[in-house]
Structures are given as C-alpha cells and as structure tokens.
Amino acid sequence: MAAVMEALVLARPFHRGPACLGRLLRRGAGGLTYGPRGRGPSRGAGDSEALRKSLQRGLVLSAGAFLVYEAHKLISAFAEVHASFKVEEVIEQADYLYGSGETEKLYRLLVQHKNSDDAELLWRLARASRDLGQLSSTSAEEKKQLAYGALEYAKRALEKNESNSAAHKWYGICLSDVGDFEGIKTKIGNAFVIKEHFQKAIELNPKDATTIHLIGIWCYTFAEMPWYQRKIAATLFASPPTSTFQEALRYFHMAEEADPNFYSKNLLFLGKTYLKLNNKKMALLWLSKAKEYPAHTEEDKQVQKEALELLNSM
C-alpha cells in the first residue's frame, strides 16, 4: 500500500480542490480584517491563527481522502485484471483437459469455481458435471446428483449471459437429462423448451455442429417414440412434440457439413437413421465410420461398440 501511495503522489498532481485551499490559506495567513479604520467586524491574531490551522487541517484531510480514493481505484482495477487473467487461465486449463478426455480432473478443476459469476466457467462446469455422470464408474445416486447440479450450473450461466450460445446448449442438454429422473410427463413437457434453447444456441452460433446434432437427436427421439408413449403424450398435451426420421437425418447431415467428422455419435446416428429408413447401403457407410472413429473418450468407446453390434446384425 505504501508503494502505491508513493506512486500516486509522484504520478498525479493535486486537482483543483486542494490547490484552491492552498491559495486561500496563503491569503489568510496575515489575518482577515474588513477595513483599516475598523469599519465592520474584524478578526484579531487569534482568530486568524485558528482559521489558518482549520484550513490547514482541511487541506491535509482533502489530500489524504484524494490519495485513498485514487489508491482504491488503482487496487480495484488491478484486482479486476487479476481476476480476469485467473478466469482465462482456468478456462484454458479446462479446455485442455476436456480435449484430453480427462473427465474427472476437469470436474475437480472447475467445481472449485462453482460460485463464480462467469458464464464461460459455469457452462463448462455444467458440461463437466454431466460428463462425469455419464461415466460407467459413477454410481446411480451420484449420476442423479450430478445431473441436477449440472442443470443448476447451466441455469446460472444463462442468468449471467443470455447471449451465450453454449449456455443455451448445455441448459437444453441438462434439462433433458433431469427428465430421465422425473418421468415421461416431465420429459415430454420439457421437450419444447429444450428445442427452443437448442434453436437459440444455433441462432447465436450457426456453425456449432454439436447443437445442430442435438436437434437431430431431438427429432430422432420423437420419431422413435413408442406408441404407448405417444398415447400418454396425446392425453397430457394438446399438441405433443412429433418428428420424423427424415427430419432427424437432415439435421445430422447439416451437422456433418458444418464440421465434418466432428463427433463419433453423429456418425453413429447417421447410420442408425438410415437403418430406420431401410437404406442399408448408407447405414453401412456411416456405421463403419463410427466404428473406426478414434476413441478419445468413454463415449467414443460406447459408440464403437454399438456401431459394431449394428454392423454384425446386418
């Protein structure tokens, strides 16, 4: 603090207030009288000395307050810059761990910042929480806790920045996950909200292949919905969500055009959708690509396994 104060004294001249007080102090040093012949009230030497000391104290207090204010501004600015650098540093580490498939390490890094107000940190924590819940080593109870925690983090990310494409995407994903624990009525009831968030994410970031893929999954899910679930949906909602495999296929291809070979699961669902449409030739093409996709994550391994099973069944 002493170094900061010294720097401020050397770097910044006083503003007008302290300078004016100095001039006034010098003018009043010899005492204030209204006339040489005693016209009007006059002040003697005692009054002049009291005024001089009063003004002197005012100058010291004003200068001190000014220096404290300037120091506070400087320290606050430094703290903001330092915090900004720290957030960027954490995000850089998080993205490296995510790219390396280090799910548990990533979660441990980000959960330390669960009280952050930064949307970029919060949606990454939502993603990490969900990914940890998807691991086969995670217990059923932990999966549930992580799913609800992920939804809360994604919700807070949206509250902090409604223009964040990734926050919309992960809110939609996490809301869908929570539906698995709350039954078919909640899951179907949330379906329109989920799709709206995916569409908003694409509106904010049209090149995001992952979100385009997710709308494809949404379409595939409702195209594949069993008849009894359709019946339940029809009794619960005037206009339940519906889709077709052709619509799902269109989104999967759009995602592949936006970012070719970006995601093993998009390749898998292209194959699965072609199977639903009885196009075995194209199904074979895409399922083979999914099987050969490099397995960087546990999800990639699961995709490889499912693709192989489907190929063998053909």
Image: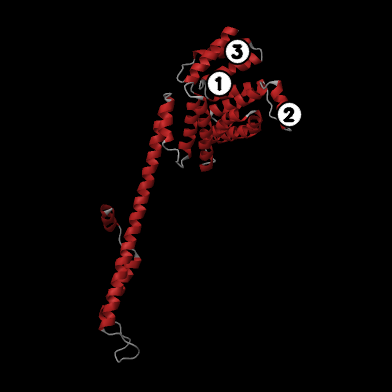
Q: Residue at x 41, y 31 (%)?
A: 108
Q: Dot 2 surroundings within 10 Å: few (below 14), some, or many (20 or more)?
A: few
Image disc number at residue 266: 1
Q: Earlier in the sequence, mark 3 or mark 1?
A: 1
Relative image position of residue 294 (x, y in whole percent): 46, 16
- Tell me whether the residue at label 3 lies in contact with that at label 1, contact meaning CB atoms closer than 8 angstroms: no
Mark identifier at residue 110: none
Tell me residue 244's x, y (percent). Answer: 68, 22
Q: Amino acid at mark 3?
A: Ala
State left or right for residue 215 relative to residue 22. Answer: right
Task: Note whether 36 is above or below 132 in the view shown.
Answer: below
Give neighbour class at mark 3: few <14, some 14-19, many 20+ (Cα, 10 Å): many
Placement of 64 over or under 97, stated as above or below? below
Label annotation for residue 283? 3
Q: Which residue is mark 2?
A: 234
What kind of element bears circle 2? helix
